[in-house]
Image: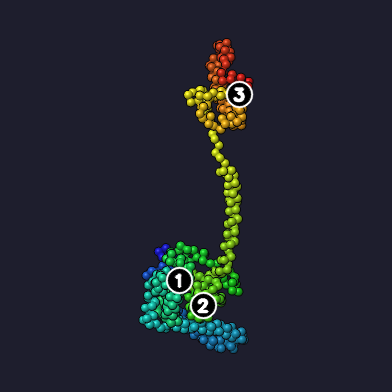
Amino acid sequence: MESNKDEALKCLAIAQKHRSAGNYASAKRFCQKSLTLFSTSEAVKLLEIIEVEYREAESSGAASSSQTAAGSSSAEGRTSAAETHPSAAGARQRHTGESSKAEGKAKLNGNATSAAGAQKKRDYTPENVAVVERVRKCKVTEYYEILSLKRDCDEADIKKAYRKLALALHPDKNGAPGADEAFKMVSKAFQVLSDPQKRAAYDQHGSDPESRFSGMSSGRASPAFSRGSFGGGGGFESELSPEDLFNMFFGGGGMPMNGASFGGGPFGGGPFGGGPMFTATFGPGGFRTTRMRTNARQEQPPAESRSIWIQLLPLFLLFAFSLLNALPNLFASTPTPDPHFSFQPSTRYNVERTTNDLHVKYHVNAAEFSGHPIAAELARNENQPGPQLRKFETNIERAYTQDLFAQCQRGLDRKQRRKDQEVGLFGIGTDWEKVRKIDEEPVESCEKLKTMGLLK
């Protein structure tokens, strides 16, 4: 993926620093990680250079260990010559310990040299090289192309393709350059495509389902598979390398090299067996495995659903109370509005009436009032006021008195302004007789309110 290119270049720069410092093992590891993230021609060339320099460094180390062994032999000769000294016993014991250490180092270096020579002597054929080159030309996330499969292939096709390529690229059977990396790419492709969930995520996003740059987080796949689940020390995730995957698939013991056992099916439960399901994250040093127990996933949703219902319960109760309060209004009939009225007669308001309490005159429309339920109520009560008429006339009296209070207040304000103009700022030269007459002038609206007993 293009999103992995920056990380791949950073790993490539780190690999170059380790190579310059002579740390070829770390340089090779970071170079392989760069190819895993994003394959570039620079990384491929640098990896070939590091492998050559690594072999040369191992050869020179073997030569230096031989010289060390020769020096230890001469030291033994000097020790035998010095035995006539009075402290010869202690010196002999000390030199004997040093010579045994030197022999041990020589044996270790000899074993490393023999192992390096065995690695150099791995045989391969042109067919082996062709298989490696075909796989290495694919991008690390082109899983279908790596296994030479179509997107609509089934589970049997995936297992068949992996079995064929794994046998052709296994380090014990293929010594061509780059065979180890190609074998890891094939194992990673099989890990993704053999898992239905990861395959669906890969088909949707086109990237590694467990990569932190992809659209699907690896944390959603399953809980971490730890050694504590199988009797080991809890808290440490086990590592499943391509070699372990190969051994399990082809009946090589069915046991990862770290000692964690798997039950149920050729993969200990996963896409081809019952029980726990294992997932993998591709990276330097192998594949990280995880596990998901189906019974745990089946027990969690009911608990989650119960908690959601408990959280939503207050909302349901509030909705129920609101509905109960709205039910009377929903089924009640719409009240008939009061008749229109006016305090002044006109052609429309042609019938005069008077309220019973304050004796306020008002006018209504004859046709509208006769068709209103108030008229029917008056007819039933023989022109005696009923509840509807009292309510109607109470509204009329309220409107009338509110208007009178407003007029009275405006009249009083006008009188106060006239008095202030006559008095002036300090009352010098004021005609107090005129002020008294202004104060005695009546305000009609206020007088009406006094007559009604609403104003003193």
Q: Secondary structure at mark 1?
A: helix
Tag nearer the camera, 2 or 3: 3
Asked whether, in this view, residue 263 is left or right of residue 117, the answer is right
| Quadrant into which the C terminus falls | top right
Asked whether, in this view, residue 217 is left or right of residue 151, the answer is right
* Residue 68 position in % (x across, y down): 49, 82
Asked whether, in this view, residue 166 is left or right of residue 377, the answer is left
Looking at the image, is mark 3 or mark 1 earlier in the sequence? 1
Tag nearer the camera, 3 or 1: 3
Looking at the image, is mark 2 or mark 3 earlier in the sequence? 2
Q: Which residue is mark 2?
A: 266
Relative vertical location of residue 301 with respect to residue 255 in this rendering, above or below: above
Q: Which residue is mark 1?
A: 193
Q: Secondary structure at mark 3?
A: loop
Q: Mark on residue 358?
A: 3
The reply to whether residue 37 is in sight is yes
Badge 3 amino acid: Leu
Residue drawn 49% across the image and 85% down it: 70
Badge 2 amino acid: Pro
